[in-house]
Image (tube, helix red, strand yellow):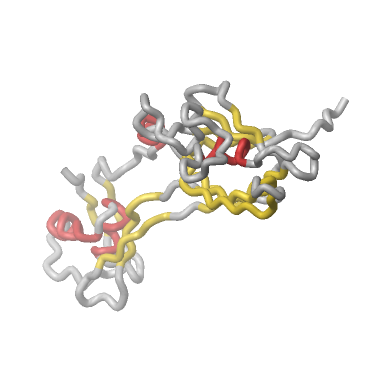
Amino acid sequence: MVNDQLKKAHLKRKDNPGVVVPFLFNPAEFTIEKGNQFAEVNVPGLPSSILQFVKGNSRTISMELFFDTYENKDNRDVRQYTDKITGWDAGSIYSQLSPEKKGLMDIDSELHAPPICIFEWGTFTFQCVIERVSKKFTMFLADGTPVRATLSVTLKEYEEVDIQIRNIDTHSADLTKRWEVVQGDSLWSIAAKEYGDPADWRLVAEANEIDNPRLLNPGTALVIPVKE
């Protein structure tokens, strides 16, 4: 039998999975962003800069979360729900979350940082920190109690250092290799591809006794030495 029960999205602490903040309503959509950072290396005589990969940027997820305690006749202060994410609203005397019960964005006294969180929605799991939240209240009771709010949330991917190191492709120019020159090749571009740095072109030039680095004939076989 197919289980048609609605899966509710939620955030929870990684170090304490019992601390779960369920969403009153599932997000209508969320956006995932991923980028890479490149540096431009200027080489005299070339018509354009050489792009050198620096690092990958962490993925981010952006979404809007809707909270409403009015339509369900609850009429409780909606901050009872929103403060569990953003933390105790110290600027408001009507905040319903005590200072002892910190939100997921508050600094943990033992971690000395906000906790690592897990965003889960069905089979989708995303380990993250809550980078940024914008909170907007849009409906109030007669006494000013907010009963409807929208949170614009940005989650940044978190991955432990040891896991990142294990996942790095360890293949590198650690053995002497040969390179056959094709039209458009230069010592700078070859060094960038083999060593990750076009400034290492002199290693290739010296290993192949090249006096003029601007003259590379297609079909020439070059030795790519080990970078010490």
Q: Quadrant of residue 214?
A: bottom left
Give the percent coordinates (x, y) of residue 219.
32, 64
In the picture, measured across the screen, residue 208 lies left or right of residue 103, that is: left
**In what quadrant of the picture does the C terminus appear?**
top left
Residue 47 to residue 192: above or below: below
Give the percent coordinates (x, y) of residue 86.
52, 41
Between 26 and 128, the one nearer to me in the picture = 26
Which residue sits at x=24%, y=60%? 198
Q: Tell which residue pokes out farthest to the right in this image.
A: 1
Q: Is residue 142 visible?
A: yes
Residue 64 to residue 108: above or below: below
Which residue sits at x=52%, y=30%? 98
Q: Quadrant of residue 52?
A: bottom left
**In what quadrant of the picture does the N terminus appear?**
top right
Residue 39 to residue 18: above or below: below
Q: Quadrant of residue 145?
A: top right
In the picture, measured across the screen, residue 136 lies left or right of residue 204, that is: right
Q: Is residue 27 visible?
A: no
Between 35 and 88, the one nearer to me in the picture = 88
Q: Tell which residue pokes out farthest to the front in this image.
A: 143
Give the percent coordinates (x, y) of residue 7.
74, 34
Which residue sits at x=11%, y=67%? 211
Which residue sits at x=73%, y=41%? 69
In the picture, measured across the screen, residue 101 lies left or right of residue 137, that is: left
Q: How many labels were placed on the picture? A: 0
Give the percent coordinates (x, y) of residue 213.
18, 68
